[in-house]
Amino acid sequence: MRDYLLTLCVTAAVTYLLTGPVRKFAIATGAMPEIRARDVHREPTPRLGGIAMFFGLCAGLLVADHLSNLNSVFELSNEPRALLSGAALIWLVGVLDDKFEIDALIKLGAQMIAAGVMVAQGLTILWLPIPGIGTVALTQWQGTLLTVALVVITINAVNFVDGLDGLAAGMVCIATAAFFLYAYRIWFGYTIEAAAPATLFAAILMGMCLGFLPHNMHPARIFMGDSGSMLIGLVLAASAISVTGQVDPDALKLFEGGTREATHAALPVFIPLLLPLTIIAIPFADLVLAIVRRTWKGKSPFAADRGHLHHRLLEIGHSHSRAVLIMYFWSALIAFGVVLYSVHSASMWIVFAIVVLSAVGLVLLLLPRFTPRAPRWAEAFVPPRYRRKRPQQPVPVLSCDDEGGMADEMPEERIPVPAGINGATAIGARARFTDRRKAGTPG
């Protein structure tokens, strides 16, 4: 665990330190596209954040190769080299897209080629645990097609969810943390060396996301762009493929006698293996809904719009930061809930906790629709939006009467004048008034 934490910290440090220079490079090269109709931000923001993330990936693999406890991953398996080859290809295509806006079909072809490169070097699905049947060995073509499909779906799911500041990096980091715990349990708990590459990939991916998040949180100073979203999507898919394709389920000794009953009893343990997309359930659901929505309207599935889940949260009334935190909450609930249930499936309190947290999540989703009002005694401890509105009394203005004394008068209604260049504020136009008399001066 110490070596994994060291690899994670080095990856995060390299990514964090390189993001600042990469931002200046993106500004100098003009990688700051104009604001589109579907964008949420209001000012042009540089992209190419994936450059720093890719070099963080390289640094993590380099450090792991020189650690005594992780060096065996590179000696006994060709998966790290396969990952680096596919990541370099998809990263290069992403950099070109951030700068020149490549066609969606070309990017789809590049994603399939990157997946094929990894398959050619051994990072592929060899077998699947099927409930009620057992371990099913796949042919070469079946494994290749399934691997390519999983890589393409995961990349586009992460790319689709990258719509708010810090959303994609944070959700992938949370999901990867849950996946890391599961893969580490298989490697350390069952002493299965084949799970070591997936554990290493998860640790490096967490470092990439953690190093980039400080620069990408709202308000973001730089975006990861397609060079970053496709990269972390590919690394996440490679981690799931490594566990699903290389770890023999029979080595876990859960198929006692090979009976169907034993297979069914072991189903909770194989949930993350059978359904690796549950780790990115929220991005995957967003991807499916986007395809259905665009196809129903007669548009291309790759046509961008403002109908994603994070856009809906903003339309409901959530702020930018709260929408991101809600997506974090659901991602953590699903990822950690599935992993925890796979470990202790017999404990009913886990199911009860998941149900309670789901109810809390629904309340958070509907919070803008049903804004609670705090009692009078608690108004000092809550934000202003939860306080009761009080009627404002007009403030009397002191003025001189005919006999030279001071008299109370109600303020005259002022006619606002449209603001000019000097009258604008950060929120909107600031009204200026023709009547500039001060209190106490004669009318």
Image (cartoon, rainbow, N blue to C red):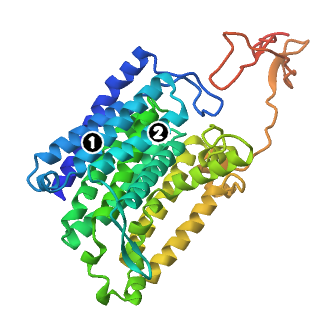
What is the quadrant of residue 135 in the picture? bottom left
Inspect the image, locate mark 1, and give the three-letter code of the amino acid beneath it. Leu
Q: Is residue 187 above or below residue 238?
A: below
Q: Where does the image place residue 228, in percent across and percent down from the top left?
A: 40, 37
| Disc 1 element | helix
Name the outermost residue toward the right: 402
Please name the residue that numbered disc 2 is placed on. 109
Distance in Å between CA atoms under marks 1 and 2: 18 Å
Residue under the point 38% across and 81% down: 266
Q: Are marks 1 and 2 in contact (CB under 8 Å)?
A: no
Inspect the image, locate mark 2, and give the three-letter code of the amino acid beneath it. Gly
Q: Where does the image place residue 78, in percent across and percent down from the top left?
A: 20, 51
Which disc is residue 334 wearing?
A: none
Residue under the point 37% across and 19% down: 24
Q: Nearer the viewer, residue 404 or 434?
A: 434
Q: Nearer the viewer, residue 240 or 434?
A: 240
Mark 1 vs mark 2, foreground winner is 2
Q: Is residue 66 above or below residue 352?
A: above
Dot 1: within a 10 Å radius of its alpha carbon, few (fewer than 14), some, or many (20 or more) residues?
A: some
Q: Earlier in the sequence, mark 1 or mark 2?
A: 1
**Left or right: where 133 falls relative to 384:** left
Please name the residue that numbered disc 1 is placed on. 84
Q: Is residue 222 above or below residue 137?
A: above
Residue under the point 60% across and 34% down: 40
Which quadrant does the N terminus fall into?
Answer: bottom left
Residue under the point 27% across and 46% down: 82
Count every numbered label the image shows and give the total.
2
